[in-house]
Amino acid sequence: MRKGNVHKFGDNIDTDQIYPGRYLDISDHKKIAEHAMEGADPEFAAEVKAGDIIAAGSNFGCGSSREHAVITLKKAGVGAVIAKSFARIFYRNAVNLALPVIQIKDLDFKENEKLEVNLEEAYIKRADGSIIEFTPLPENILEIYKAGGVIPYYKAKHA
Amino acid sequence: MHALWKILAEKSGQENVEAGEIVNAEIDLAEVNDLYLQVIKSFYEMGGKKVWDPDKVTFVFDHYSPTPTIKAAENHKQMREFCDEQNIEKLFDINKGVCHQVMPEAGLVYPGMLLTATDSHTTTHGSFGAFGTGVGATDLATILLEGELWFRVPEVIKINITGSLKKGVMAKDIILHILGELGQDAAVYKAVEFAGPVVDNLEMAERMVLCNMSVEMGAKTSYIKPDQTTREYIDKRVDHDYTVYETDADFEYDETYEFDVSNLEQVTAAPHSIDNVINVKDAGDVKIDQVFIGTCTGGRVNDIKTAAEILKGKKIAKGVRLIVIPASDEVMRESMKKGYIDSLMESGAAISAPGCGPCLGAHQGVIADGETCVSTSSRNFPGRMGSTGAKIYSASPATAAYSALYGKLIGGAE
């Protein structure tokens, strides 16, 4: 279960807005986190609290293949991203790094609304107690989440 | 099945695959570019010792090449050391160019292969009948470990391009027009096939532009059925058996679109999204500061030739900077032999070493707050080429050259 406040964003939030290309040579994860969502909202990295949830429109994470876009959100404390749809490479990267990504076609969350996300049982609980169900993730993807990402998943296999 | 599905079926050892199915497929070539030292870090973190097959791994230094920062130089250094330790011989160092041009030129790309690279524009290789798709650093690290990756079998969208192109209209105009009509989320998680008489008549470099930019509508991969034009390019470069898969006659596409391009004019993706496409002549009076001709979208010989012919014997407008970056060493040398580089320099162009250049805002021509750039590259997101306060108009090399000539966004001679 993950709990946090909603930060709302629009459609087609691309990876340059999530993590501008000029910082791509940074590989220290703490420093990467300082630029989270900088291209879309320069105040985001300072304001986001651990567990907070991004609620966005369609095609979230479009653009480049940069894994920094996931690392920056995860290390900045983002607990989950909910969007109408996700760009493919961002989606894969998020799975690999165990950042919960949830696709919900009809979104009407409010800014700062408190949500609880249950990835395993595929539902979101709103502050008023109402429940929104989403399509459960395929088993192979849930296993990667359970392991804490693809690195520990493979580590267990290869160590 | 679609030819792309047959590739996934073959690589995953299955008779049949269906859209939505998840398969584990063997990778024919895994490319790492110089953005992703994380690939190596993740590989070792996962307990990796030796890569599964060094002959199927290639490194291309293109995004930060030659290195603009000490950090980038350290990344290159560690990547060279990794290649050395792992016996990876296909290291294309700072003297080669953009991976999506360098790999086909080196004969590494052929029909029927499954190619993954740490770059979203890996869809480019669909123009050779390959299944090419971009992956993130950690995905690539799992490939180095095991030589395979899970894939969701994509639905396929077919785009038929018919009619005949007006003089001065290029593949870049076609794909921008399609993006403008369909939108940047039209093919999210799907594959896009380009077909029809216009595609049949395009040379390889122009076909590559279509497949390259299919990712801007969210495509996982793209495809153009290999023909005589493909074979002529491949057969003098590729030293590898290959299979051209046929799409079954009864295959049902997810969507089929028809685009008659007979009336298509020069178009541009105006700031700040790639599907914000308008006719160049309708853009109004747009004063510009910089023109960039280059990248895996618009930096090939015919692009440079087009610009050189437009600017031949003329000077670019006062106050405008023209940056030309050939996509590869081969492109640069051919452009030099044909006199295009000399001619462009005579017109006032600055030429930089082959690579991605300022496309992603790394170096070799990043733009300042308040500036406007016409670029042959594929993205115009806020901040893509430098300041988030800059504007990028994505356009064809012809439009870029005319814009440099007149100092404003324009698609033809005044």
Image (cartoon, helix red, strand yellow):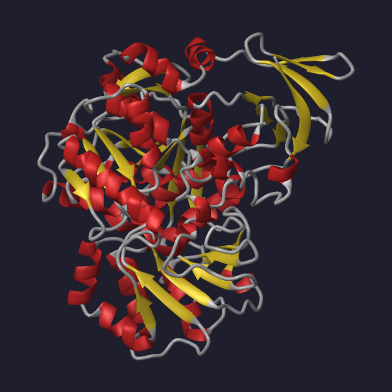
Q: Is residue B248 visible?
A: no
Q: Is B125 placed above or below B12 here?
A: below
Looking at the image, which is closer to me, B248 or B229?
B229
- Judged from this view, the residue extending furthest toward the right is A128
What quarter of the picture does the N terminus of chain B occupy? top left
Looking at the image, which is closer to me, B313 or A112?
A112
Residue A21: horizontal and vertical position, in percent?
51, 53
Looking at the image, which is closer to me, B84 or B352?
B84
Q: Is residue B106 visible?
A: yes
Q: Is B314 placed above or below B55 here?
A: below
Q: How many marks?
A: 0
Give the image quarter of residue A4: top right
Q: Is A104 placed above or below A112 here?
A: above
Give the image quarter of residue B101: bottom left
Give the image quarter of residue B164: bottom left
Looking at the image, which is closer to me, A154 or B206?
A154
Position of residue B94 in the picture relative to residue A21 (left or right)? left
Taking the spot 51% from the left edge, 83% from the top edge, the residue there is B320
Taking the spot 24% from the left edge, 48% from the top edge, the residue there is B103
Position of residue B101 in the picture relative to residue B222 (left or right)? left
Residue B400: horizontal and vertical position, in percent?
46, 73
Taking the spot 56% from the left edge, 52% from the top edge, the residue there is A20
Residue B318: horizontal and vertical position, in percent?
51, 90
